[in-house]
Image: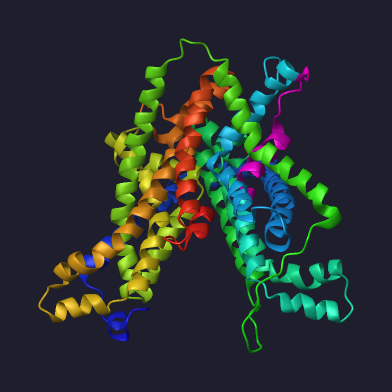
């Protein structure tokens, strides 16, 4: 139930507006400071920075990677979505879950698996005598990211195909169109919003990724930003590269908004849409089984098999104490991030649900703006800010946790806002009519019913923060070694034995969230949208 007219039109109280404004305004501070830092460059120097051949090459490489990852993801996701929604395959629910599980394997872990597959000591050479060259460059980065992000598009397409009215296809077939012609002229146009939303998420993730791309030795904006700043080469160049990367991400947002504008796909007739009738595979049974097996082997079998291979061959004197310490450090960072995200999401969600208007819209959009900014520019802005204004915070655990919490705050808002809209204000208003004050009515009536949604949002922020790499690499204090940092550093050094246990624990951390979402779809109506986040 949506908020009542009286509640939605009432002026929001200061104790709610102030923290919501602080949460939204905090997103602007590092971004504004990044602009200020970049503006310190003279115009003559700026021309040399921006128009150098290396910058054009970085842009070309970034765009090429986005195109390749989108292409690979589409070639995988579209056939899988058609198979689980339109054809009679055994256990379609199980296969849907399996096609979602690659999200539990971060891109840098997928890159580690692809690198560990080859080489003299790799499993291919040890078992089959196939000594493949090391995967790297555009091909390696596209494979590592494509095999990780294709579930984002699969989830969107599966939902759209399941909701599509079969009467549309039947009408086209009755007019003489073939099954293939009907698919291209009727089905594909109705999948446009699903394609666009999935592609947007994948494109934003690709331009902001660092770990998988760096392991594959491919130069794009994100790797150049990190190298320029971490190596203390040209910090102003790093600032301008960050702004260019943010502009590229913003262009994807605008392009998606333009492409979806004016799209009208709702039913105009009367009656209810019928469920889709699944067809038998027939002659497609063997090709479909081979395709499903290939996808599962590449996206799940390779990373699990390679990690198990290197774990079994790891020396007995592995630093198990160090592995445990790394896991505790990861928990020690992700835990506070989740708590801060929950605390920050509550006033923003309350303002948006109980007092919709310009103020609440502005606060909510500012929070989402912080999430759409790629991780490295966001972290670089926080680093610049701390160096100039708050030097005592530079490379501190407080700065790292605060940056992660700000960046992932948007993830905790969605579940809380959706639950508040379901609850409505009437029960709380009834408690106030019985003599309870505003805070007492909220804490005794609304908060207990909101707790599950807040925990769900906090859990999401926890899982994403646990596997975050770019921000952690750039802002972590000396001596910090999270699971993600250890996977990256050991793989970079070629110590695949040492990276294996950290990669295995990383998959366990990520898999916990995926398992919770898949196991409780009834408790969490927005599970797929949060997976897309």
**Stretch in magenta:** 128-150
Residue 34 part of the magenta-drawn span: no
The x and y percentages for residue 293 are 72, 42
At 36% from the left and 51% from the top, the residue drawn is: 458
451 relative to 238, above or below: below
Which quarter of the rendering shows the N terminus? bottom left
Residue that lies at the very extreme toward the left in this rendered image: 435
At 61% from the left and 43% from the top, the residue drawn is: 148
Numbered disc total:
0
355 or 366: nearer the eye?
A: 355
In the rendered image, which quarter is residue 198 located in? bottom right
Question: In this image, 303 relative to 190: left or right?
Answer: left
Secondary structure, magenta segment, majority class: helix
The x and y percentages for residue 177 are 88, 75
At 60% from the left and 61% from the top, the residue drawn is: 197
Question: In this image, 470 relative to 428: left or right?
Answer: right
- Res 435 visible: yes
Residue 130 part of the magenta-drawn span: yes
Residue that lies at the very extreme toward the bottom in this rendered image: 270
Question: In this image, 441 relative to 332: left or right?
Answer: left
């Amino acid at each position: 139930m949506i908020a009542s007219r009286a509640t939605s039109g009432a002026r929001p109280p200061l104790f709610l507006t102030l923290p919501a404004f602080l949460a939204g305004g905090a997103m602007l501070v590092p971004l504004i400071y990044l602009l200020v830092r970049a503006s310190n460059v003279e115009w003559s120097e700026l021309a040399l920075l921006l128009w150098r051949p290396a910058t054009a090459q970085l842009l070309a490489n970034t765009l090429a990677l986005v195109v390749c990852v989108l292409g690979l993801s589409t070639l995988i996701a579209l056939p899988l979505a058609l198979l689980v929604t339109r054809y009679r395959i055994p256990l379609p629910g199980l296969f849907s879950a399996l096609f979602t599980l690659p999200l539990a394997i971060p891109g840098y872990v997928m890159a580690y698996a692809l690198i560990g597959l080859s080489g003299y000591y790799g499993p291919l050479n040890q078992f089959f005598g196939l000594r493949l060259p090391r995967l790297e460059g555009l091909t390696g980065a596209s494979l590592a990211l494509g095999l990780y992000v294709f579930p984002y598009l699969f989830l969107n397409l599966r939902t759209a195909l399941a909701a599509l009215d079969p009467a549309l296809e039947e009408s086209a077939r009755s007019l003489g169109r073939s099954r293939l012609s009907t698919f291209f002229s009727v089905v594909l146009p109705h999948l446009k919003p699903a394609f666009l939303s999935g592609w947007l998420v994948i494109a934003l993730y690709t331009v902001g990724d660092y770990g998988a791309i760096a392991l594959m030795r491919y130069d794009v904006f994100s790797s150049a930003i990190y190298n320029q700043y971490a190596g203390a080469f040209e910090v102003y160049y790093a600032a301008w590269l960050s702004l260019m990367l943010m502009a590229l991400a913003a262009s994807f947002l605008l392009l998606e908004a333009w492409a979806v504008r004016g799209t009208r796909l709702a039913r105009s007739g009367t009656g209810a849409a019928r469920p889709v009738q699944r067809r038998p595979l027939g002659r497609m049974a063997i090709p479909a089984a081979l395709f499903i097996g290939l996808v599962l082997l590449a996206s799940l079998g390779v990373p699990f098999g390679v990690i198990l291979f290197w774990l079994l061959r790891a020396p007995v004197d592995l630093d198990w104490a160090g592995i445990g310490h790394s896991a505790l450090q990861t928990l020690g960072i992700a835990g506070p991030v989740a708590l801060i995200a929950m605390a920050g999401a509550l006033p923003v969600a309350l303002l948006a649900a109980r007092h919709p208007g310009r103020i609440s819209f502005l606060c909510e959009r500012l929070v989402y703006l912080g999430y759409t900014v790629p991780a490295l520019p966001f972290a670089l802005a926080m680093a610049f800010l701390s160096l100039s204004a708050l030097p005592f915070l530079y490379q501190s655990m407080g700065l790292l946790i605060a940056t992660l919490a700000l960046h992932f705050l948007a993830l905790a808002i969605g579940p809380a806002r959706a639950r508040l809209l379901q609850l409505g204000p009437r029960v709380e208003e009834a408690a106030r009519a019985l003599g309870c004050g505003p805070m007492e009515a909220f804490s005794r009536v609304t908060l207990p019913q909101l707790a599950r949604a807040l925990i769900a949002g906090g859990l999401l922020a926890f899982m994403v923060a646990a596997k975050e790499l770019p921000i952690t690499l750039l802002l972590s204090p000396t001596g910090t070694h999270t699971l993600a940092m250890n996977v990256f550093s050991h793989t970079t050094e070629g110590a695949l034995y040492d990276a294996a246990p950290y990669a295995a624990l990383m998959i366990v951390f990520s898999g916990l969230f995926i398992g919770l979402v898949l196991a409780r779809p009834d408790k969490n109506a927005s599970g797929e949208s949060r997976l897309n986040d």
